[in-house]
Amino acid sequence: MGTKSSDKPKLKHKKGFWSPDEDQRLRNYVLKHGHACWSSVPVNAGLQRNGKSCRLRWINHLRPELKRGMYTVQEEETILTLHRLLGNKWSQIAQHLPGRTDNEIKNYWHSYLKKKLGKLEEMDAYIKTQCATTTSSSDLSYESLMNHTEKSSRENNDLAKEGHKSSLPKLLFAEWLSLENVHSGSSVNSGHEQVISGDGFNHHNTNFVQDSFTHNNLLNEGSFGGDFHGGFNNDLMEEMLNSGFKFEDQISGIGFVDTFSGDDICNNDVLYI
DNA sequence: AAATGTCGCAACCGCTCTTAC
DNA sequence: AGTAAGAGCGGTTGCGACATT
């Protein structure tokens, strides 16, 4: 900064894919000297690239802490949740997924998760349509719903075959169960009375995550927690994020996992909503 | 076997924000 | 306060690999 670009000779910067040699040069230079000023990196590293290109290459491919490979279910859920909350703020989403880059997440979203979400919303619309045309949920044809669910399930399996590790869980709808069933312990979701604590949360009931997460991500049109009776809203969510709350900690660690991961949501590939 | 379509990914482009002068 | 340059971000594009016809 502070140096006029016109003072520097105009270099013809190379574009396109990086060669292994270029990667090696950049990696060696950054590991040794750091990257205080990206515009000076290519000059000092002997690369015919611009600083911007070097920065991108380092961030997206050369950083040692980068994680490669398939996304875990937890990572998917984190992306879906944060996207619902933050929109296309890929860099912010990436901050909650260690080892993943914004570019990688963005690509993953466009190539896979968007379709997955679309199918869920399609199902949601179908359910709503069916509910609107019937006087009560019990009038909703089990057969027609199962047909639709199976169709979607097949489509999701097709998605999985396309190279992605996980198909969507089958969906069961807790709203069809009586509240008594859901809350009394006879529910399929019961058995986990533990609430998340010690992380700034003020949890109201065992179904906190189940209600807010699944409802808002899979059913509701509104924003995260918009009408959630437990008081979990955007402000709280943002507060959580700003205070250093990490989804990955909650999901893979001691928090969410007890209330809504394996046992509650995806046990036997069944998702209870 | 060849042509065509689709998908995933890497990289570029353009914009905004921040910072130094 | 104004300006220029760097850094960062999100959208988009281009290309190779693979699948389908």
Image (cartoon, coloured by chain):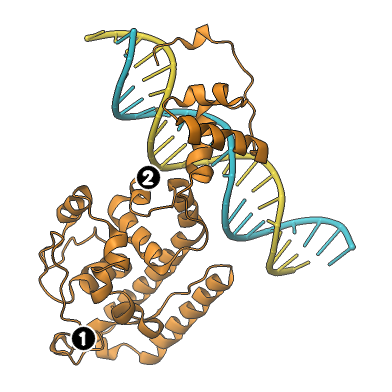
Chain colours: A orange, B cyan, C yellow
For badge 1, the amino acid type reads: Ser
Percent coordinates x, y for residue A24 in the rendering: 61, 38
Percent coordinates x, y for residue A22 in the rendering: 63, 35
Q: Which mark is residue A232?
A: none
Q: Quadrant of the N terminus of chain A?
A: top left
Left or right of A159? Residue A261 is left
Residue highlighted by disc 1: A190
Residue highlighted by disc 2: A91
Name the chain under label 2.
A
As drawn, A256 above or below C2: below
* x 45%, y 66%: residue: A116
* x 41%, y 27%: residue: A36
Left or right of A14? Residue A99 is left
- Assess disc 1: are there few (<14), some (14-19) or many (≥20) residues with their C-alpha within 10 Å of its C-alpha: some
Percent coordinates x, y for residue A152 in the rendering: 47, 77
For badge 2, the amino acid type reads: Ser
Percent coordinates x, y for residue B13 in the rendering: 54, 30
- Assess disc 2: are there few (<14), some (14-19) or many (≥20) residues with their C-alpha within 10 Å of its C-alpha: some
Residue sitting nearer the eye, A52 or A273: A52
The answer to whether marks 1 and 2 mark residues whose Cβ atoms lie closer than 8 Å is: no
Q: Quadrant of the C terminus of chain A?
A: bottom left
Task: Kindly state the secondary structure of the residue where label 2 is placed.
Answer: helix
